[in-house]
Image (cartoon, grey):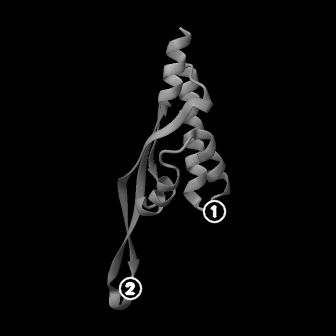
Amino acid sequence: MKAMLKNYRQAPRKVRLVADLIKGKDVGAASIELSFLPKRAAKIFEKLLSSAEANAKQNFSLDKENLFIKDLRVDKGIVLKRSMPRARGSASRINKRTSHIVLTLAEKPAAKAAKAKTK
């Protein structure tokens, strides 16, 4: 149950602030927390979380209540290099950084045991 987002146009340092808040939480609790978070990356994480949840439901027939965020990685993406004119005809470089986000969901161990007993 994975969802990926590549080349998201925000610096990984800023995106990791949001990622650290929801890592290891239940899907429901994480989505509630993201809806009230005043960070730009929170909206992207909400979309990514709902995508991973839909993948779990469609591909593995899992319930939303039994899922939690197992792994959440924010890696460095490509860096767009731009320049800004400075004094005396020189220029300074501006790095526009991007992020790769990988979200992995897993089923709670108690839910796995309960599902095995019913079968």
Determine the residue positioned at 50% across, 14% down.
Answer: 116
Determine the residue positioned at 54% across, 19% down.
Answer: 114
Determine the residue positioned at 57% across, 30% down.
Answer: 66
Packing grade of label 2 (10 A; few <14, some 14-19, many >=20) is: few
Residue 92 lies left or right of residue 105; in this view the side is: left
SS type, badge 2:
loop
Q: CA distance from mark 1 to mark 2?
A: 34 Å
Quadrant position of residue 4: top left
Rendered location of residue 104, percent (x, y):
45, 37
Determine the residue positioned at 67% across, 57% down.
Answer: 36
Q: Which mark is residue 38?
A: 1
Give yes or no for contact between labels 1 and 2 (Cβ–Cβ under 8 Å).
no
Rendered location of residue 29, percent (x, y):
62, 45
Q: Which mark is residue 108?
A: none
SS type, badge 1:
loop
In the image, residue 112 above or below residue 104: above
Q: The residue under label 2 is which amino acid type? A: Arg
Packing grade of label 1 (10 A; few <14, some 14-19, many >=20) is: few
Total count of labels: 2
Q: Nearer the viewer, residue 99 or 80?
A: 99
Instruction: Farthest residue to the bottom: give it.
Output: 88
In the image, residue 109 above or below residue 48: above
Q: Nearer the viewer, residue 23 or 109?
A: 109
Q: Which mark is residue 86?
A: 2
Q: Nearer the viewer, residue 54 or 65?
A: 65
Q: The residue under label 1 is which amino acid type? A: Pro
Residue 48 lies left or right of residue 16; in this view the side is: right
Rendered location of residue 108, percent (x, y):
50, 31
In the image, residue 76 above or below residue 6: below
Earlier-in-chain disc, 1 versus 2: 1
Instruction: Farthest residue to the top: give it.
Output: 119
